[in-house]
């Protein structure tokens, strides 16, 4: 079913999207646009749903991060309900906004106070210029992006169903794609200089692997967004220290019988990983943090442990909380094996239906928050509640970026104090 069979867009929108992939890459002469960083950047207007407070999140001392992956334009159309085949319907609202996993996550990180750099590729077209301008306005360094003189920038149709509160994405990749030869060693070295962490959304795999290998040589940790199986993902997983994955990925990758046992399997298969998180939408998230100590206090099956932690969740509390096992447990999975570490269960914010607008980019906001938390040295219990809070703010506006909070947002006030005793606030430890 094509988009033309499902959605009748305005003539102005159709005119914007008359891009078509060329028949040959030989006609292109790609250039690297080293955009001079502006001494004063444009300030993006904050969403009306965001309330600023006098305090703000602390800015980490090590706040430079490098990301590689997708950045695009999102054409967001809200409809009363998703159309049936051959239907012609009208949008209730329409918005043009930057998108792409890496672009969204780094925008979130920038608003929280980090200094992100992005390696990606766009075309020198209206969409590409819009992508660059929006990223720069939010504080993302775009000087390492490759700009193709011809071709098309990536774009995505996003259809938001108001009835079910779901969204459908139809993506058109950029052309021609980024290849490693377009990133010189000097530019790669410059991009990695001073970086606290490197992030990949799993796209542009050949280039991402080159970046990850160089980062590993420099002892810079890597966070990987494992959304689904992709070309080159196995190589990136073997280089990563932190993994955030979608609900379906752990079992698809490991063939384990449950998500908790799949997380154990991931840690056994990938010895470099320090923690792995699986996001579960409105069900929250799970995390296992590997222990650096050999001794353990107690042994428990992870599936049984998960059920025990679920019983400790206060279902009447609408705000995100984190329930954790004892630290340094022997976490076992039947038929899989065992790892030493801590198991954590994070809840999602219960957003009233009257406030829930669009879940587009919620996972990207979660990852952007995790990047901030790593740079700020947050303990895992606080990190999961923080990421869930930021992601929930983003769901209150149309698109992946409109609702992303800034570090002065009052909803983040509970995280202002880095030395907060998380065991009495946003977390509760399993006994």
Image (spheres, helix red, strand yellow):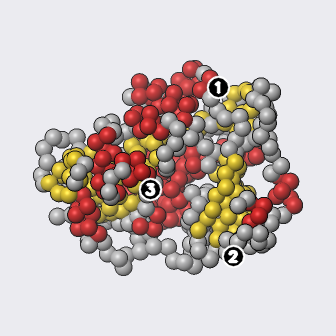
How many angstroms separate mark 1 from mark 3 (CA)? 33 Å
- How many other residues sit within 10 Å of disc 2, few (<14), some (14-19) or many (≥20)? some
How packed mark 1 is, by other alpha carbons closer than 10 Å (few <14, some 14-19, many 20 or more), is: some
Q: Earlier in the sequence, mark 1 or mark 3?
A: 1
Q: Position of residue 57 (x, y in %)?
A: 46, 54
- In the picture, the disc for residue 248 is 3
Q: Residue at position x 41%, y 70% from top?
A: 319
Q: Residue at x 40, y 33 (%)?
A: 239
The mark nearer the N terminus, 1 or 2, is 2
**In the image, residue 103 lies at what x, y percent?**
60, 46
Q: Is residue 51 left or right of residue 235?
A: right
Q: What whole-number distance in Å separates the C-alpha atoms at marks 2 and 3?
A: 28 Å
Q: Observer-nearest residue: 411 or 96?
A: 96
Residue 185 location in percent, x, y? 56, 20
User: Residue 38's quadrant in the figure?
Assistant: top right
Which SS class for mark 1?
helix
Quadrant for the C terminus, please.
Answer: bottom left
Is residue 164 placed above or below 24 in the rendered structure? below
Q: Name the residue beneath numbered marker 2.
A: 80
Using the rendered image of the protein, determine whether residue 426 is visible from the camera's viewpoint: yes
Callout in the foreground (1, 3): 3
Tell me which numbered mark, 2 or 3, is placed earlier along the sequence: 2
Q: CA distance from mark 1 to mark 2?
A: 44 Å
* Helix, strand or loop under label 2: loop
Q: Position of residue 327 (x, y in %)?
A: 20, 52
Labels 1 & 2 near each other (Cβ < 8 A): no
Compared to residue 306, the image places residue 297 above or below, namely above
Res 182 label: 1
Residue 124 is at least partly visible in this image = no
């Amino acid at each position: 079913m094509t988009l033309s069979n499902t959605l009748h867009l305005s003539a102005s929108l159709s005119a914007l999207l008359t891009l078509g992939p060329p028949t040959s890459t030989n006609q292109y002469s790609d250039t690297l646009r080293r955009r001079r960083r502006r001494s004063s950047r444009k300030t993006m207007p904050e969403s009306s749903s965001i309330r600023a407070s006098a305090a703000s999140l602390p800015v980490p001392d090590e706040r430079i991060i490098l990301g590689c992956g997708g950045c695009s334009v999102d054409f967001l159309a809200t409809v009363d309900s998703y159309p049936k085949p051959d239907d012609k319907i009208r949008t209730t609202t329409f918005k043009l906004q930057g998108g792409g996993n890496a672009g969204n996550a780094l925008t979130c990180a920038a608003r929280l106070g980090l200094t992100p750099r992005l390696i990606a590729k766009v075309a020198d077209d209206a969409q590409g210029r819009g992508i660059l301008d929006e990223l720069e306005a939010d504080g993302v360094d775009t000087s390492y992006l490759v700009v193709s003189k011809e071709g098309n920038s990536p774009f995505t149709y996003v259809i938001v169903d108001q009835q079910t509160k779901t969204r459908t994405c139809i993506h058109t990749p950029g052309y021609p794609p980024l290849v490693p030869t377009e990133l010189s060693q000097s530019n790669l070295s410059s991009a990695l200089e001073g970086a606290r962490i490197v992030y990949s959304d799993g796209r542009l795999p050949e280039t991402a692997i080159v970046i990850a290998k160089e980062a590993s040589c420099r002892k810079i940790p890597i966070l990987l967004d494992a959304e689904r199986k992709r070309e080159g993902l196995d190589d990136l997983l073997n280089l990563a220290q932190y993994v955030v994955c979608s609900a379906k990925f752990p079992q698809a990758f490991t063939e384990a019988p449950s998500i908790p046992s799949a997380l154990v399997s991931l840690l056994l298969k990938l010895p470099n990983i320090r923690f792995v998180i699986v996001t579960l939408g409105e069900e929250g998230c799970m995390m296992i943090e590997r222990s650096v100590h050999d001794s353990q206090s107690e042994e428990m099956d992870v599936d049984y442990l998960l059920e025990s932690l679920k019983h400790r969740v206060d279902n009447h509390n609408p705000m995100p909380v984190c329930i954790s096992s004892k630290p340094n447990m022997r976490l076992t999975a039947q038929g899989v094996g065992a790892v030493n570490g801590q198991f954590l269960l994070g809840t999602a914010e219960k957003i009233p239906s009257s406030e829930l607008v669009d879940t587009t980019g919620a996972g990207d906001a979660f990852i952007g928050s995790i990047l901030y938390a790593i740079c700020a040295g947050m303990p895992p219990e606080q990190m999961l509640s923080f990421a869930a809070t930021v992601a929930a703010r983003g769901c209150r506006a149309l698109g992946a970026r409109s609702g992303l909070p800034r570090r002065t947002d009052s909803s983040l006030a509970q995280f202002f104090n880095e030395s907060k005793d998380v065991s009495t606030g946003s977390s509760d430890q399993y006994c």
